[in-house]
Amino acid sequence: MKPSHPDAFLAVDLDDYMTVLAIIANADSILRPEEMAFYESRMARMLINPKLRSQMRELLRNDYDVEETIKGMDQRTLRLALRDGIFLAAADGEVHPTEVEAIRIVAKYAEVDQDRLAEIWGWVKEGLEWMANGPSLLEIPLRD
């Protein structure tokens, strides 16, 4: 998944970005393999070195007060993390109400209105549908 060039991450706080993703991943208290894969892919996309990745994974073990945690974060970081956090929440095929609530709080602090938030959700849905069609192009089953 390549919604942003690695250079896009040069303008954001990587710790805050990964913290927002961790907040959304942990919102329903269940970290699914698809969510973990997305989290890992973001670290790879940002070219984070392996030692720092271990520290970033620790963020997934924390409990968060969403508003308290994000209230001092900059808007650019919050907006990029919001978009990717929506993708993370939807990656497992099920968006839990607590994930939606965390996303709404992030959107509020990122100053993203409901119309734009709906556009982002639509973009994520289209992307997931597009990717789901890929295996059928192989004309062979990927699972036995």
Image: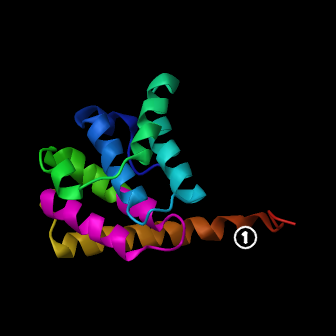
> Quick check: 137 left or right of 32?
right
**The C terminus lies in quadrant:** bottom right
x, y percentage for residue 98? 35, 71
The magenta stretch is 85-109
The residue at the point 46 percent across, 67 percent down is 90
Residue toward you, 12 or 27: 27
The residue at the point 32 percent across, 45 percent down is 19
x, y percentage for residue 142? 79, 62
Q: Secondary structure at mark 1?
A: helix
> Quick check: 92 left or right of 22?
right
Magenta span includes 100? yes
The residue at the point 24 percent across, 70 percent down is 117
List the single residue furthest toward the right: 144
Which secondary structure type mostly characterizes the magenta part of the structure? helix
Residue toward you, 59 or 103: 59
x, y percentage for residue 86? 37, 63
Instruction: For residue 51, say whether it is visible.
Output: yes
List the single residue furthest toward the front: 63
Q: For residue 97, which quarter of the picture?
A: bottom left
> Quick check: 78 left or right of 128?
left
Image label count: 1
Q: Relative to 106, does residue 55 appear above or below in the rendering?
A: above
**Which colouring convention does the figure follow?**
rainbow
Magenta span includes 89? yes
The residue at the point 47 percent across, 47 percent down is 39
Label 1: few (<14), some (14–19) or many (≥20) C-alpha neighbours in 10 Å: few
Please name the residue that numbered disc 1 is placed on.
Answer: 136
What amino acid does circle 1 point to?
A: Ser
Instruction: For residue 46, say whether it is visible.
Output: no
